[in-house]
Amino acid sequence: MLLNILIIVTFPILLVQGLLVRKKTLKLPEPTGKRVGCCQCASNVPNKVHLKGDAHSGVPVSCQKMKAPLALLIAGDSAAAGVGVSTQEQALSGWLINSLSENFCVNWELKAKTGVNSTDLLSMLQRAKPNLDPTYYANSTSLSTITSTHSFDTPLQCRSFDVAVISIGVNDVTGFTSWRRWRSNVTQIIEILKARYQCRLVVFTALPPMHEFPALPQPLRWVLGQRAKYLNTALLKLVNKYHGVNVLTLTLNPIGNDQSDNTLKYMAEDGFHPQVAGYQLWSNAVVKLVNEELDELVGKNSNVG
């Protein structure tokens, strides 16, 4: 309530500062590269993770001896899209696929776009029709076609996902999405991922510390920082109601560097997005969580798959 009053009182200042930031901030493009890919050893196999494969798991013996298939969705805003680096290999998707491929055959899709907020992401998931053909990825011609046309607005190709990594919220902060709308959107995002796409694990990334963003002047920086904290609090309360849903909170100070060093090392030149080292740090945290949580989920359910 107090924050809302302060926003109303300072709105003229915030409006001017917001317009100036938008005008002056360097607008970085989304990186080039693939936004969908498949694992050849998992061809003709329903994309379900089998961490403890056996003769009855549905996974070929040859694949069991190699790596279990893992279906991965990366979705959300410009950070999920990789803004701040030149190619997807340097972005979150590239680091994730490279790291997860050490233990899994990864079928993956990236559904992210600059400017997307929680309402946009929910709408995409609601209108997308999951592909019901478990042999879809075996068709190399189809894969070539969807690779060239894949975007945030095209239908999802996987029939289901084992893991969904979600980056959302910054545009809800800057667009002043209400607390009630945010809660409703996040709840529906979780439920549609669980029900329609059968996600075993959903990983939300907590909103970044916007009160530390170097590109934002005061008092705009403080106001947006407080709003980010409120949305993070709501997000944490929501995920506690669900099994297999987590919030990943990143720290950009893993080795004790001061804030100026962190900004140079992890932030892109626009002062808003990660650069290569930032995406690698983010990916490492996600991979650690995925490995821990999937092991736990499998341990609790001997019938996985």
Image (spheres, helix red, strand yellow):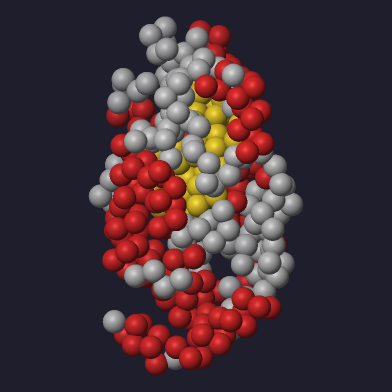
The percent coordinates of residue 296 (x first, y second) are 36, 33
Residue in view at x 36 percent, y 82 percent: 3
Along the line of sight, the residue nearer the viewer: 229 or 4: 4
Q: Image check: 212 left or right of 267?
A: left
Along the line of sight, the residue nearer the viewer: 75 or 150: 150
Residue furthest toward the right? 86
Q: Image check: 202 left or right of 191?
A: right
Mark yes or no: residue 249 visible. no
Residue furthest toward the left? 241
Q: How many labels sit on residues?
A: 0
Residue in view at x 51 percent, y 8 percent: 61
Image vertical order of residue 69 relative to residue 288, above or below: above
The percent coordinates of residue 97 (x first, y second) are 60, 36
Residue in view at x 58 percent, y 58 percent: 114
Q: Give the quadrant of the C terminus.
A: top left
Image vertical order of residue 148 relative to residue 214, above or below: above
The percent coordinates of residue 117 (x first, y second) are 46, 60
Mark yes or no: residue 45 visible. yes
Along the line of sight, the residue nearer the viewer: 120 or 294: 120
Image vertical order of residue 36 relative to residue 11, above or below: above
Q: Give the quadrant of the N terminus.
A: bottom left
Q: Quadrant of residue 139?
A: top right
Residue in view at x 47 percent, y 76 percent: 224
Q: Image check: 259 left or right of 188?
A: right
The percent coordinates of residue 180 (x first, y second) are 29, 66
